[in-house]
Amino acid sequence: MTPDPEPGTPVPYVVDISHWQTNITPDITKQWVAAGINHGIVKIGGGNSGIYESPTHRVQVAALRAAGVPASRYWFNGRDVSIANQVWGARAQLDTTPLAAGERFMWDVEDEGTTARWTPAEVADAAQRLSDLVPYSQQVVYVSASASRAADWSPVVALGLQVMVADYGNDDGTPSSTPLVGFWPRDKVWIWQYTSKGRLPGYAGDLDLSTGDLRNLWTVRDLQEALNKTGANLTVDGDYGPATLAAVTAFQEAHGLTPDGDAGPLTLTKLAEVAG
C-alpha cells in the first residue's frame, strides 16, 4: 500500500448534512471549522419520493459558505422516476444554487428500504447526462466499501468519477475499520466516511463524518499488487473476482489464518507485513 496523504498534503475532514440536521447556522459551522472541518456535503434533493429539493439545502449551503467551507452537494438515488428526470431535477437545483470553486456533486447510491440502489450503468448514465454542467472530474459516487466490491464499477471508473466510500466499523465516532474499495484506484478515492455517529461542537446530534486520511484504507488494486508480491499472478484491475478470492484464500492458508477468502483486517495486516 502507498500511504496517503503525502507529507504536507492537507487532509479533507468532511461533514455530511441533510434535512435530518436542522438549525445549522453560520455560528455552528464556524465552530466546526475551528474543530477541523474543511469541507461540507449537503443533500440537494433526491428521486426516492418523486423529485424533490431537500428543504434545508439552501440554508445549509449558505451556512457552510459563511464559514468559508466548500459546500458540495449530493443527490439521493431513487426509482420513483426515470434517471433522465432525476438528472433534470438535480440540474434545476444546481441552476438555482450553483456549485462554487472546490465543490463537488455526488451521486448517493445506497439502498433505501426495499428500493435497490442504482446500478453502475445507471450511475454512468446519470453522470453522462450531467457532464455538460458538472464535469466528470467534479462528480463523485458514494457507496459502501462492500457495494464497491459487489458490482462491476469499471464503467463509472472509466469516466473518471471519484468515490466516497462508507465503512463504519464499530461506528463509534472514530475511524475503526479497514475499508477495502473495489475497482477504483487509490488516487480516485476522495474520502472515507468512517462514522454516522460523529460529534462536533455546537450541534447535539449525530453527524456523518469523513476523512481524507486513507492510510487505513486498501483498494482491491492494492490487495492484488500485494498478493502478486507473495507469488500470485493476478491482473491488477480492482475486481474482487474468483481469481482474487482464490489468491486471498491461498495466502490465508499459508499463514495460519481462517481460509475464507475474506480480506479482512487480520489478513490485510499480515499481507502488509509479508509483502512489505
Image (cartoon, rainbow, N blue to C red):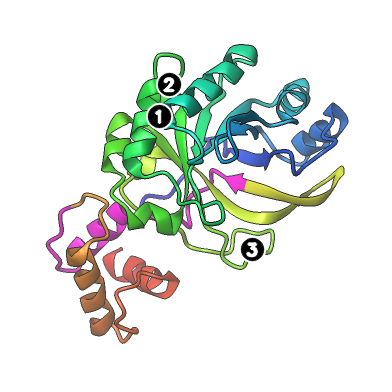
State which quadrant residue 185 falls in. Answer: top left
Disc 2 and disc 1: Cα gap in Å?
Answer: 6 Å
Task: Kindly identify the amino acid type of the residue bearing the numbered disc 2.
Answer: Leu
Quick check: is 265 in the magenta stretch?
A: no
Q: Say whether residue 180 is visible.
A: no
Dot 3 lies on which element?
loop
Residue bounds of the magenta highlight: 210-235
- Name the quarter where the N terminus is drawn: bottom left
**Which residue bears the numbered disc 1?**
126
Label 3: how many Cα within 10 Å (few below 14, some 14–19, many 20+)? some
Q: Would you say the residues marked 2 and 1 are in contact, meaning their CB atoms lie under 8 Å apart? A: yes
Task: Return the x and y of residue 141 as percentages of the image width and height.
Answer: 45, 39
Amino acid type for the residue under numbered disc 3 = Asp
Mark 1, other Cα within 10 Å: few <14 / some 14–19 / many ≥20: some
Where is residue 250? Give x, y as percent.
Answer: 21, 77
Quadrant of the drawing holding the C terminus:
bottom left
Res. 171 mark: 3
Q: Of the numbered discs in the image, which one, if any, rests on residue 209? A: none
Residue at x-position 34% and y-position 57%: 150
Q: Amino acid at mark 1?
A: Ala
Measure the alpha-carbon separation of dots 3 and 1.
31 Å
Residue behind mark 2: 130
Residue 124 visible? The answer is yes
Q: Is residue 231 left or right of residue 109?
A: left
Whichever of callouts 2 and 3 sits on the residue coming sooner in the sequence is 2
Q: Are marks 2 and 3 in contact (CB under 8 Å)?
A: no
Does 230 appear above or below 135? Answer: below
Q: Nearer the viewer, residue 91 or 176?
A: 91
Secondary structure at numbered mark 2: helix
